[in-house]
Structure formats: structure tokens, C-alpha cells
């Protein structure tokens, strides 16, 4: 948070007015280069801002603002995408990595993970409780999108695909509404990933 908003821009000021506690990093912020880094070769896109929400309400506020202001935005957790879809020129990036929460269900058969949870964080957390789940081979991949677009990994033979492990989901839709995925939306995100909202 120290270097968030070293230099305000009209865009960042408008976002701050809507969500005062939102962490916003501009091109002048010392951490901007490291925050925009992704696992894509030849990534040269110039981003407008990087926002790091910590709550789903903040995600909702960002999306509502971007849609009403006609600002392109992308979403990332681990930043692994050969196509570089989280790095669009002159876009705002919703960096979900601080939404990294894991909660074990009382019956110890399932967990609730935040949208920014990375694979190695889930593995370490479950291991500390004597549990495990199917994950991918790369530790810095975001768990949610990995699972939602298929979920291939070394434990598929034991537990099935990541996509088959999705029991429920909360997402922010294109209008900025926070919704619980009904049966139809849940079916859609199992394989369709984040095309139906920010999970």
C-alpha cells in the first residue's frame, strides 16, 4: 500500500472516490513494473492502472465503474496466459492476488477459495491440515481459473479434473452485481471459465 497512488491520475482519483480503501497503482508507482509482470513472452502492453481489491465489493465497484465509463479491464491472479489476455493495451487490471483466502468446510471434504488463491498457497494450506486436492503442475497459477477452464494436473487420476471439483461459485457479473451461481451459471463456468463474470 505504501507506493499505491504516488501520483494521482484523473482515472485513479475517480476510482478512489468510489472505493477509498482500494489499492491503486499507477505507472508512476515504484511497484508498478513488478505488479504488471506476467508470464507472457514479449509483453509490451502499457496498462492504465493496476487495482488490487481485497473484497468482492471492491471488485463490484471497479467493474461498475469501468462499464459505466467505457474503460477496458482485465482480470488476473497468477498471470499465466500464452495469449496475454490479462495485459491489454490501455486497460485497467483487476489483480485478484490479495483475495487469497482458504477456508476448510466443517466436514473436511471441501474448501472455499478466494479468487486470487495461487496453486502453491492451496497446496501448502491443505498439507498443513493433512489434506490435498487436485492442482496443476505450476505453483504460481491461479486456482480458480485453472479449475474453471479444465483443471488438468498430476492428480487427475486420483481426484478427477479441476473443473469437476467446482461445487459452487460467487461471481461479479458484467453489471457489477455479486451473484451466487445458479445451476445454469455454474454449468457455464465449468469449462467456460471467467467468460461469465469475475469468479
Image (cartoon, rainbow, N blue to C red):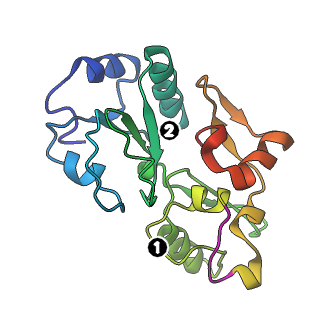
Between 66 and 58, the residue placed more toward the observer is 66
How many numbered dots are placed on residues in this image? 2
| Of marks 1 and 2, the one in the foreground | 1
The reply to whether dot 1 and dot 2 touch (C-beta < 8 Å) is: no
Residue 197 relative to residue 156: left or right: left
Type of secondary structure dominating the magenta stretch: loop
The disc label shown at residue 55, or none:
2
Q: Residue at coordinates 62% horizontally, 77% vertically from top-left?
A: 153
Whether residue 153 is in magenta: the answer is yes
Choose top left, top right, bottom left or bottom right for residue 32. top left
Numbered range of the magenta stretch? 150-155
Choose top left, top right, bottom left or bottom right for residue 128. bottom right
User: Picture coordinates of residue 67 (x, y %)?
Assistant: 50, 21
Between 137 and 112, the residue placed more toward the observer is 137
Q: Residue at coordinates 65% horizontally, 79% vertically from top-left?
A: 131
User: Picture coordinates of residue 193 (x, y %)?
Assistant: 65, 50
Q: Earlier in the sequence, mark 1 or mark 2?
A: 2
Judge the density around disc 2: few (<14), some (14-19), many (≥20) Cα neighbours within 10 Å: some
- Residue named by callout 1: 139
Residue 193 shows up from this direction: yes
Whether residue 154 is in magenta: the answer is yes
Question: Considering only vertical position in the picture, is 175 above or below 27?
Answer: above
Please tell me whether mark 2 sits on a helix, a strand or a loop. loop
Q: Residue at coordinates 74% horizontally, 37% vertically from top-left?
A: 180
Q: Residue at coordinates 64% horizontally, 73% vertically from top-left?
A: 152
Residue 106 shows up from this direction: no
Disc 1 from disc 2: Cα separation: 23 Å
Please tell me whether mark 1 sits on a helix, a strand or a loop. loop
Amino acid at each position: 500500500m505504501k507506493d499505491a497512488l504516488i501520483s494521482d491520475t484523473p482515472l485513479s482519483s475517480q476510482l478512489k472516490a468510489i472505493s477509498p480503501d482500494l489499492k491503486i497503482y499507477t505507472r508512476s508507482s515504484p511497484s508498478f513494473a513488478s505488479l504488471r509482470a506476467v508470464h507472457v513472452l514479449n509483453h509490451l502492453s502499457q496498462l492504465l492502472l493496476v487495482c488490487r481489491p481485497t473484497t468482492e465489493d471492491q471488485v463490484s465497484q471497479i467493474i461498475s465503474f469501468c462499464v459505466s465509463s467505457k474503460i477496458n479491464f482485465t482480470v488476473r491472479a497468477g498471470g499465466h496466459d500464452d495469449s496475454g489476455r490479462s495485459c491489454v493495451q490501455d486497460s485497467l487490471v483487476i489483480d485478484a492476488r490479495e483475495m487469497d483466502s482458504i477456508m476448510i468446510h466443517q466436514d473436511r471434504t471441501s474448501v472455499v477459495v478466494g479468487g486470487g488463491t495461487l496453486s502453491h498457497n492451496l497446496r501448502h494450506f491443505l498439507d498443513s491440515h493433512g489434506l490435498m486436492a487436485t492442482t496443476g503442475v505450476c505453483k504460481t497459477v491461479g486456482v480458480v481459473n485453472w479449475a474453471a477452464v479444465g483443471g488438468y494436473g498430476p492428480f487427475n487420476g486420483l481426484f478427477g479434473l479441476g473443473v469437476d471439483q467446482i461445487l459452487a461459485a460467487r461471481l461479479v457479473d458484467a453489471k457489477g452485481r455479486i451473484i451466487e451461481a445458479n445451476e445454469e451459471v455454474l454449468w457455464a463456468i465449468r469449462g467456460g471459465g471467467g467468460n461469465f463474470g469475475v469468479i
